[in-house]
Amino acid sequence: MRRALDMLYRAAAGLAALCLVAILVMVAVQIAARLLDFALVKLGLPPTRFIVPSLAEISGFLLGAATFLALADTLAKNVHIRVDLLTTRLPDGVRRVVDGIVALLGAGVSGFATYAMAALALKSLSYNDLSYGMVAVPLALPQAVLALGLLILTVALVDEGVLAFTGNDRITGGGASV
């Protein structure tokens, strides 16, 4: 089970990385096209006027996807910033219980957000909602990806809660603290 969960978190992080690479490629193509047009104009030639349609909008969708898909992996690797002024002063047993309760409360909030985002995606799908950019993107697609990221985060939070209650938590293993 541990291997399957870690693979799920890594796969989501891999998809997040691919989203960031897609943003990089689109922006690089747009910049290259602008530089080419500048050079062509300086040489007295007509510019290509090439643009990446809906660049800002699609980049926004990809950034949202990257953010939400990476949440579970960063939680599992204990690289989220944690405010632990109180919990570091607690005895280990009490700290584990507090960490477990907090993780399960977070799972509840994340679970509700997952439900709400999935319901929004289904509603957008039923109404055939489209974005307003030059490229009409069905809004259910980015919404579904956000719901998937939230679902994986919910699983990771339940996982962290279970690990904390069983004394196998990764919280004491390091990570950013405040």
Image: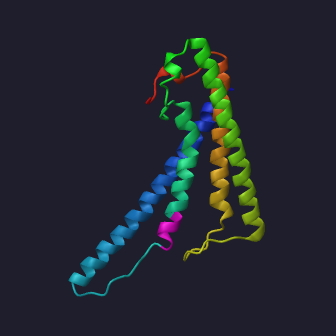
- Left or right of 49? Residue 80 is right
Region rendered in magenta: 53-58
| Position of residue 76 measured from the top left corner of the image (x, y, whole percent) | 56, 31
**Depicted 126 relative to depicted 178: above or below:** below
Q: Position of residue 61 (x, y in %)?
A: 55, 60
* Occupied quadrant, residue 91: top right
Give coordinates of residue 124: x percent, y percent: 72, 65
- State left or right for residue 65 relative to residue 108: left
**Magenta residue check for 19:** no
Q: Which quadrant would the N terminus be assigned to in this image?
A: top right
Tell me what residue is drawn at x 74 percent, y 65 percent: 125
Q: Name the magenta segment's main secondary structure.
A: helix
x 39%, y 69%: residue: 30
The answer to whether residue 47 is visible is yes
Closer to the camera, 97 or 124?
Answer: 97
Query: Vertically, is 96 above or below 148?
Result: above
Estimate the x, y position of residue 89 in percent, counting from the top left: 50, 16
Residue located at (47% from left, 67% from top): 56
In the rendered view, would you say 114 is above or below 176? below
Q: Which is nearer the eye, 107 or 125?
A: 107
